[in-house]
Amino acid sequence: MIIFDKAGKRFGNVDAVKDFSLTIEDEEILGLLGPNGAGKSTLMLMMGTVYRPTSGSITVQNLDVVHQPNEVRKMIGISFQDPRVDGILGAFDVLNWHLKMTTTFSKQEREKRVEEVLKTLDLWDARGKRTWLMSGGMKKKVEDAKVLAQRPKIAVFDEPTAFLDVPSRLLVWKMIRGLREEGSTVIVATNMMDEAERLSDRVAIMNLGKLVAVGTTEQLKRTQKGGEVLEVTVSQGPEVTENLLTDFSEVSQVKKVDNKIMVYLNSGRLLLPKIVETLSDLGFKIDSVHLKEVTLEDVFLSYTGQRLE
């Protein structure tokens, strides 16, 4: 179990993480969603003892990250957002060296694990290729492979499928699930909505260094009143306020993001013509209208006011 208790990290006058409290259960895959700069990486580096919290506490399997950092490090493996590999070495040597530094495996066991992971990730034929000559996607797979071969008690992946094509993404997801099935607790910090939704048991949403929501995807969707979202694209019109459509009792929330008016509501198909007519009468020039069910992206937008790129 991992417990963040009002954890915070300040750099100068900036709170990168503030009053973050969350319990992550054993053998859980937690998706950590947030826009760039939300504090996801800082949070993970505090848990991994790279950064020291400036407030609150973090415990990993009842070990305090400040007072027992060496013991904590033995349980954690981190795949960083930007691959951290020795460009002179080939993929096989990078992984073998990583296991030598982070585990007590014998030489035979290290080489066996490295071979298994490289073959699964379709990197075996490139095992001797210097990593500085590899594409961004290949480097990313080597970075992920470090943790996949290590199989730590706590596995952390920061943007694990950035630069990867669709087949490679699906493969990495399958291997991450395999880690959990073998007993690892997994944290996946991501900017990709589908990755968080398809891979995670629970999703935690961060914004401006704070935890703003946590739950399963279905639980998070149910936090939004109304089961539908009417997305109205406009090219001109007056200021959008929360009480813009108060005459409609079925409307629970109205937001404006860029050139889109987001209307959270029930009975969307019945109300659509009336809402469009009302907006037109108010002076909005409507370019398009789209009605859909609430998605995780809508939840994220509701809590953060931003879309993930």
Image (cartoon, rainbow, N blue to C red):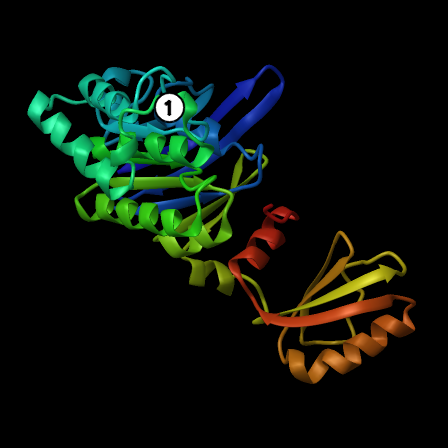
Considering every residue shown, the one lying at the far bottom of the view is 270
Rendered location of residue 147, percent (x, y): 28, 32
Q: Nearer the viewer, residue 135 or 46?
A: 135
User: What residue lies at 35% left-to-right and 21% top-to-bottom?
Assistant: 130
- Residue 217 left/right relative to 297: left
Rendered location of residue 45, percent (x, y): 41, 25
Q: Nearer the viewer, residue 131 or 41?
A: 131
| Vertical relation: 83 (above or below) 309 | above
Question: Where the N terminus falls, by quadrant?
Answer: top left
Which residue in the structure is indicated by mark 1?
131
User: What residue lies at 17% left-to-right and 44% top-to-bottom?
Assistant: 182
**Amino acid at pointer 1:** Thr
User: What residue lies at 80% left-to-right and 58% top-to-bottom?
Assistant: 241
User: What residue lies at 9% left-to-right and 21% top-to-bottom?
Assistant: 107
Rendered location of residue 27, percent (x, y): 24, 45
Determine which quarter of the picture holds residue 184: top left
